[in-house]
Amino acid sequence: MHPIITTLIKRIGLGIVSLFFVTLIIFSSVNMLPGDFVEAVLGQSRTEETVRIFRQELGLDKPYHVRYVNWLTSAIQGDLGNTFSGRNATYANQPQQNTARSVSSLLQPRLFNTFFLAAMTAIIAIPLSLILGITAALYRNSFYDRTVNASALTAISMPEFFVAYVLIIFLASINQFFPSLSNVTSSTPFLERVYLSILPALTLTLVTVAHMMRMTRASIINLLSSPYIEMARLKGMSRTKVIIKHALPNAWAPIANIIAFNLAYLIVGVVVVEVVFVYPGVGQLMVDSVIKRDIPVVQGCALVFALTYILLNLIADVISIVTNPRLLYPK
Amino acid sequence: MSTSKKSRSLLLNIRNISIEGYSDEAWHPIIKGVDLQIKRGEVLGLIGESGAGKSTLGLAAMGFVRAGCRFTGGSISFEGKDLTKLSEKEKQKLWGTKFSYVAQSAAAAFNPAHTLLNQTIESSLSHNLETKENLKKNAVKLYREMQLPNPEEIGDRYPHQVSGGQLQRTMTAMAMTSKPDLIIFDEPTTALDVTTQVNVLATIRSIVKEHQTAAIYITHDLAVVVQMADRIQVLRYGETIEVAKTNQMLKSPNQEYTKSLWAVRSIQKKPQKKEDTILKIESIDASYDSGPMVLKNIDINVPTGRTVAIVGESGSGKSTTARSITGLLPPTNGKIIFQGRKLPARLSERSKEDLRRIQMIYQSPDTSMNPRHTVRDIIGRPLKFYHGVVGNRYTEKVIELLKMIELDESFIDRLPEELSGGQKQRICIARALAAEPDLIICDEVTSALDQIVQEGILKLLLRLQKELKISYIFITHDIATVKAIADEVVVMHQGSVVEQGLKKDIFSPPHPDYTKLLLSSVPEMDPKWLTRILTQ
């Protein structure tokens, strides 16, 4: 078998193993959250009897390990369970009148929104940071390089809510180019969706470009002292060709890693931006559910986040493997 | 191209060139007003020790200075232009067309991400010298001239897929592609094994002659330059010491410095026989992880108070043998008997006393010392660890050791970066001595040093052996070093011992085939050596 295939199988196996450990961590930490959903919902009027029945109904009376196995086995089959919060005390005694929604149906539109915003940001941010990084490496230590570096650092040094409000002031308030509220729904047409999401996407671009651009620049500059770069220059290749043809192909591994890291951030870490722009993404849903102690939803969100994270890093690994000629073309 | 009329004319004229390099926040001169002339079709040998400015001058001949360096005076005239005055763009038109460069380490100078053929024709292609088809055909022709195996297909391979010798020949082919007027060879065979070097030297020489290309051949190896060059220019500290025709310089060097370069290797240890052995290696095998066996059935005897030199090419298992003896790589089979007692295979199972008795000195003193430790810490650590020396006695002992390696006590608070290469290696020797060992394994300890410095280190090691009765295992690929220091010689090849015996027996016929090849591949100071060896 080609060694790349064995390496890939190993990586995927490792990904699955780490996902398994993540489920353990998610389950135990969510269940260690202080407070109790049942007591919170039933409030002052609770009796021992209603508490017992409600617990039974939610499955909270079973021991931890049974609940974990149940959750895991149905999660593997794509069933993340039902939310707690759709139920209420009134129906506690009559399970058949339950209005609880499934976690998946709650998660799906939110997830779509989150991926939409992440994709939109990535489409702007990745090419932008690659171009900035490459040109900064090309003209390193020039005025251009310093300006790009300084602005990127400034953008990354400010908290994202601050960046968001600054953009709102200049692009939504003083000049009313874009809306400051990004309250998309599932029926919003595509172009309007893009228009509504511009400000959050711009905010996220500003906070992620710095990382990716600086990593691209550093990876390329790191290679510029290699003997083969000197060789390329001594062969009379122009500066641009030296960088694009000789440095960049050997710099993909670290660049892919930092891009994966930032993409993951765009999906799992954007709750602040979602709140500022009232954008209905997964981050908001998760925070709301934590407040409501809606355990299945929190677990579902965490699982989706973990899956994204592991998947993106897996892709970055694959890229660094297939761009390494030593692995791709063995002796 | 190769008319006799043209081959007489001056190709490149460097007048009074000066180059500075920036380090430690100041500009330091590297080349101090050097003249260099080269005619069409002529090969000029440029020799000198490290730091002499050979590479800097070689690159300057193309109008190139490395990052952090600059021209500060003089001129480089080529085809009526002064290269020091040209813009980067104008120079790019000359590089890869009129000038080519062949670097020291082909493995590092080829881009790992592109095939050999792509890199070979890249420069001529981007300068629009020829169509891609013709360039490919021409490359295959050059590969064949360089005697590369499968010239039609080798171009489709990636650099890591071919051997070091093949890469070096491919790089020469790459340099020839544009039919340049001048090629700079910067130590092109230094990284190769001697047996590989012979073929690369021969192909470089014939192709340069065939195409009437002028060349600057940079090396520190006199025997090599003598084979290659029509004229030799000797550099030291960025200044020209002497320029003369090869034969003339060999016969009657004018300057003291040149004479001293010619005269190195004056030490010849008289081999002494000794019956009792300090270390006996009995049929050990070893491999890294579950990889192939790198040591096969090795038997080596080290007589007490004597030096056993292990010679062989890269990959022959010399250093692995050392790792097995020290326990860093436990052998899978066989035993190691030290002072009549079987040593535990693993490092972790050996007692402190076992560890103390066998010490090691490494090839590169730069990487084997912690750059943040002072000489006091470096030498003192084994004193504290093995002998529990502390307080005033500690400093006294460090100074004593410094005296032993011919350095005075002013060195005690210096950091490694404040020492020269030779001084660093001396400190490493003192560190090994501090443990008061019975056996020291020296792994290529002189390979990274200049000839004259090497001589000093070898003399020191010989003196210490006489005074302290230490036994040495001396690992090297350099036959001259073996002649200088060894009592007994072990020849290794592909993980096996070819032969072991007294120095005079190993170096006199009859030889096993491999020893014969190894010994005959060592360049000699005779200009006809290469021709002779090829006709044999």
Image: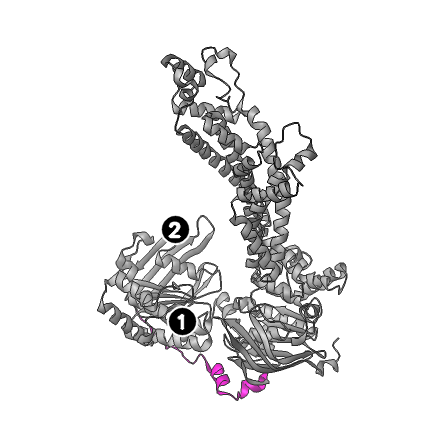
Where does the image place residue B400, in percent across and percent down from the top left?
Answer: 27, 73
- Check if residue A153 falls in the magenta segment: no
Q: Which residue is mark 2?
A: B332
Amino acid found under the numbered disc labelled 2: Thr
| Mark drawn on residue B418 | 1
Hey, which quadrant is residue A121 in on the image?
Answer: top right
**Magenta residues (range):** B245-274
Observer-side mark, 2 or 1, equals 1
Where does the image place residue B133, in percent across and percent down from the top left?
Answer: 76, 59
Give the quadrant of the N terminus of chain A. Answer: top right
Where does the image place residue B254, in percent across and percent down from the top left?
Answer: 53, 89
Hey, which quadrant is residue B121 in on the image?
Answer: bottom right
Give B391 or B44, whichever is nearer the viewer: B391
Decide: few, some or many residues near mark 2? Use Cα within 10 Å; few <14, some 14-19, many ≥20.
some
Any part of residue B509 in sight: no
- Please determine if labels 2 and 1 lie on a single subunit: yes
Q: Is residue B152 left or right of residue A51?
A: right
Where does the image place residue B354, in percent across and percent down from the top left?
Answer: 28, 59
Give A34 or A217, whichever is nearer the viewer: A34
